[in-house]
């Protein structure tokens, strides 16, 4: 269902010449992180992502991105490239890219799953259409953006509480006022001790924890019980992605809100975790298969009374981060913060990476995603 503004934009485009897609390129890139990110199940040292470059016959270009996420969507970098190059790109060449032509049904019939690839190509098509029409992506999604800035949280996942506290203090000085602890990697007693140490050090700062499926039911119960005085805003994905029975038991016995991330791959999943007692969800474009679906998920969360965290995956460039900002500005009730991950990269592929200013990142004002891709930087980091 198109919103009012999208209908207006679409209607205005009816009289325009078609925006014909001339070529679609799948570009694998590898970018170094500033430092390794250790989380339950995986340690990430570099971002292995897919960039999608869509070019129209008039020379206009749009960009999309999806990170590999083997422990979240099952997408590997090779799989993302093959999905685009062999299955999705050939179907799009010669098609009209204006967004009233929703190519998702055709693309989803041709390639089931592979939500990262579907998200990257939809992002590139919307960026292209936005640039060609002078429209910000957020304005294609909604007549009433919920906000114009977002305040990103910073992830903490060091070996010791002292290192976490030192990093948090340094990031506070840069303007971060919201932190997330990665748990489920160390022994449980260490996770609990770290939670209290960081809580005491950041006494009035919103703090949450993310286990990335890394706890057993018993360990999750103990963590929630023993950290209840730490006043965590929420604990994310304590149990495995499919363990809704465990979630139900856990949610019944704790006052700390539980959010779900790896469990969410569709609107039906959002309904299911709500019924099992979750109080919020993390929306990522790669899990839902793109903007339209993620925005619909946001509206469903509003209807169900679920809080939202909008997140990019560790680590996306400013292309993926810009997309997350547009989603977070379009979606209602983003009460559980925003995770932007280009800040964790040593280098970016856009001319002016999104900046943190007074603790906030502004919605980019340019057309489409509002970031200018540096094609020389893309070439530098392309995996050959
Ligand atoms: Mg998470």
Image (spheres, rainbow, N blue to C red):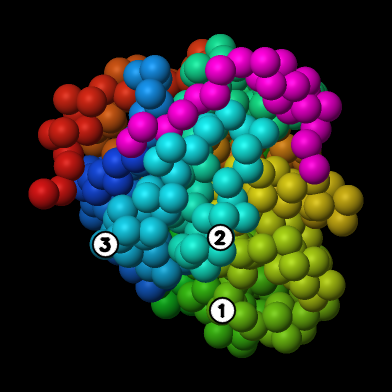
Pointer 2 or 3: first along the chain: 3
Pointer 3 or 1: first along the chain: 3
- Give left or right: position of 301 versus 221: right
Q: What is the secondary structure assignment of the residue under circle 2?
A: helix
CB under 8 Å between callouts 3 and 1?
Answer: no
Residue 15 magenta-drawn? yes
Which residues are the magenta region? 1-23
User: How far apart, in angstroms, are the residues tagged by discs 2 and 3?
Assistant: 19 Å
Mark 1, Cα crowd under 10 Å, few <14 / some 14-19 / many 20+, is some
Query: Is residue 164 something that shows in the picture?
Result: no
Mark 2, Cα crowd under 10 Å, few <14 / some 14-19 / many 20+, is some
Which label is found at residue 78? 3
The residue that mark 1 highlights is 240
Q: Nearer the viewer, mark 3 or mark 1?
A: 3
Pointer 2 or 1: first along the chain: 2
Where residue 226 sits, quadrant-wise, is bottom right
Q: Nearer the viewer, mark 2 or mark 3?
A: 2
Q: Who is closer to the viewer here, 108 or 235?
A: 108
- Give left or right: position of 198 versus 68: right
Which label is found at residue 92? none
Q: Count the marks: how many? A: 3
Residue 109 magenta-drawn? no
Query: Is residue 89 something that shows in the picture?
Result: yes
Q: Nearer the viewer, mark 2 or mark 1?
A: 2
The residue that mark 2 highlights is 108
Q: Who is closer to the viewer here, 133 or 267?
A: 133
Q: Residue shown at 42%/33% (left/top)?
A: 21
User: How far apart, in angstroms, are the residues tagged by discs 3 and 1?
Assistant: 25 Å
- Note whether ligand 1 is within 8 Å of mark 2: no
User: How far apart, in angstroms, are the residues tagged by discs 2 and 1?
Assistant: 27 Å
Whether residue 260 is situated above or below residue 59 in the rendered picture? below
């Amino acid at each position: 269902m198109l919103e009012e503004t999208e209908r207006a934009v679409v209607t205005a485009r009816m009289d325009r010449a078609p925006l014909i897609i001339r070529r679609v390129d799948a570009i694998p890139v590898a970018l170094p992180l500033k430092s390794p990110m250790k989380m339950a199940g995986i340690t990430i040292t570099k971002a292995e992502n897919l960039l999608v470059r869509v070019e129209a016959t008039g020379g206009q270009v749009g960009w999309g991105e999806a990170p590999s996420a083997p422990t979240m969507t099952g997408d590997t970098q090779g799989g993302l490239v093959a999905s685009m190059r062999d299955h999705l790109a050939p179907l799009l060449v010669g098609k009209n890219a204006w967004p009233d032509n929703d190519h998702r049904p055709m693309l989803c019939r041709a390639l089931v799953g592979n939500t990262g690839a579907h998200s990257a190509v939809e992002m590139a098509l919307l960026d292209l259409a936005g640039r060609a029409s002078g429209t910000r992506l957020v304005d294609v999604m909604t007549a009433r953006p919920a906000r114009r800035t977002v305040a990103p949280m910073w992830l903490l996942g060091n070996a010791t509480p002292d290192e976490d506290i030192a990093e948090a203090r340094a990031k506070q000085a840069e303007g971060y006022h919201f932190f997330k602890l990665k748990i489920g990697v160390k022994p449980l007693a260490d996770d609990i001790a770290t939670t209290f140490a960081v809580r005491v050090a950041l006494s009035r700062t919103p703090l949450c924890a993310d286990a990335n499926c890394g706890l057993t039911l018993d360990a999750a119960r103990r963590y929630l019980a023993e950290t209840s005085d730490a006043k965590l805003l929420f604990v994310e994905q304590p149990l495995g992605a499919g363990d809704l029975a465990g979630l139900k038991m856990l949610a019944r016995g704790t006052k700390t809100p539980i959010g779900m991330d790896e469990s969410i791959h569709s609107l039906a999943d959002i309904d299911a975790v709500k019924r099992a007692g979750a109080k919020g969800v993390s929306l990522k474009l790669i899990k839902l298969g793109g903007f339209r679906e993620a925005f619909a998920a946001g509206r469903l969360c509003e209807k169900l009374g679920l809080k939202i965290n909008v997140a990019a995956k560790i680590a996306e460039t400013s292309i993926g981060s810009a997309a997350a900002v547009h989603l977070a500005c379009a979606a209602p009730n983003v009460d559980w913060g925003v995770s932007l991950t280009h800040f964790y990269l040593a280098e970016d592929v856009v001319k002016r990476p999104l900046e943190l200013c007074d603790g906030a990142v502004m919605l980019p004002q340019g057309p489409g995603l509002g970031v200018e891709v540096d094609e020389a930087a893309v070439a530098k980091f392309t995996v050959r």
